Image: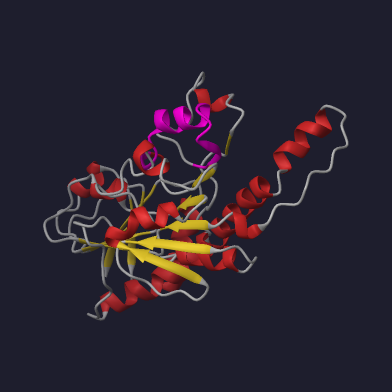
Amino acid sequence: MDVALCCEHPEAASWQAMLAGLLPGVRLHAWPTACPDARAAIVWSPSQAFFDAHPRLEVVFNMGAGVDAILKLKLPAGARIVRIEDGGMAVQMAEYACHALFRHVREFDVYDAERAAGHWAPRPARMRQDFPVGVMGLGALGSVVARSVAGFGYPVLGYSHSQKQIDGVTCYAGDALDDFLAATRVLICVLPLTPATRGILRRETLSKLRPQGYVINMARGAHLVEDDLLALLDEGVLAGAALDVMQTEPLPAGHPFWTHPKIRFTPHVSAQTIVAEAIAQMAPRIAAWQRGEDVGGVDAARGY
């Protein structure tokens, strides 16, 4: 079977070698070499030119968890997108979320400033029960984040499009967004980016958090209305934010986030695909599709 491979990634050569080893009988054609007759493709950050050169594709296996960039392109009619659900990212995102949460609740930023000023000043302990954590998005990634936070004894709430049940997590769904926000003090966004979730972190929603709310966004920069966040921080409505994703990446020079005292950010590193784990998850799906089995696919209307 011929499979087109488009991998704009620094580790493209190792990905191709591992895939070849796990998919005997599959002939991989690495872009920019085209294989117009290929019915399947494996992609990482594909271009429109790649899809234009492969008009017979029936299925596109995406090596990343997010598919919003692919959905902006024009794919061959009827082509399905199948994505990995984790690829080693869930635990990394849980680590990032817990680190940001602990840094805020335990006031480690304050201790850093005190240390830099030469002050030794212990602060009163704060209670975990006073910082209920709301996780937006309870899929393969968000559910791990929610369980991890709950494991440290924090009250945890979760919100998703459809109702979920997770031990230790109070789950909200659909029209219950306002109730979820009103019960949340630390908000963690792990939502997929869809037309319905674009700009969901805006003044209207963030103002509904409990007093002195804190925002952790490690989903997509387009979820957040940056000017609204800045205004709410300056007005004292929100206590701070930890951001891993931005509207424009890399963050432009002179952007207010660089110097804002209540914002901490990282350069889109909260979860990075672990090559071996991603391929181990994807290869069996490709083999199953080759056998004619149902391998699911992204709902283009919902965006995930």
Residue 174 falls in which quadrant of the image? Answer: bottom left
The vertical placement of 63 against 49, above or below, is: below
Q: Position of residue 10 (x, y in %)?
A: 50, 46
Q: Position of residue 203 (x, y in %)?
A: 38, 36
Region in magenta: 222-244
The picture quadrant where one finds residue 59 is bottom left
| Vertical relation: 236 (above or below) 101 | above
Outermost residue toward the top?
Answer: 254
Residue 260 shows in this picture: yes
In the rendered view of the protein, which quadrant contains the N terminus? bottom left
Q: Which quadrant of the figure has residue 220?
A: top left
Image color mode: secondary structure
Task: Depth check: give the residue in front, 88 or 186.
Answer: 186
State the residue in front, 272 or 121.
121
91 lies above or below 256: below
Residue 231 is one of the magenta-drawn residues: yes
Task: Determine the residue located farthest toward the left in the rendered image.
Answer: 77
Q: Is residue 109 left or right of residue 227?
A: right
Left or right, 150 with respect to 250, comes to: right
Q: Residue at x 18, y 55 (%)?
A: 36
Task: Please name the residue shown 38% across and 54% down the image.
Answer: 191
Q: Position of residue 76 (x, y in %)?
A: 14, 54
Residue 16 percent location from the top left of the image: 44, 59
Q: Is residue 36 magenta?
A: no
State which quarter of the image contains the C terminus: bottom left
| Residue at figure coordinates x 38%, y 76% from the top left | 284
Q: Nearer the viewer, residue 87 or 289?
A: 87
Residue in view at x 25 percent, y 80 percent? 293
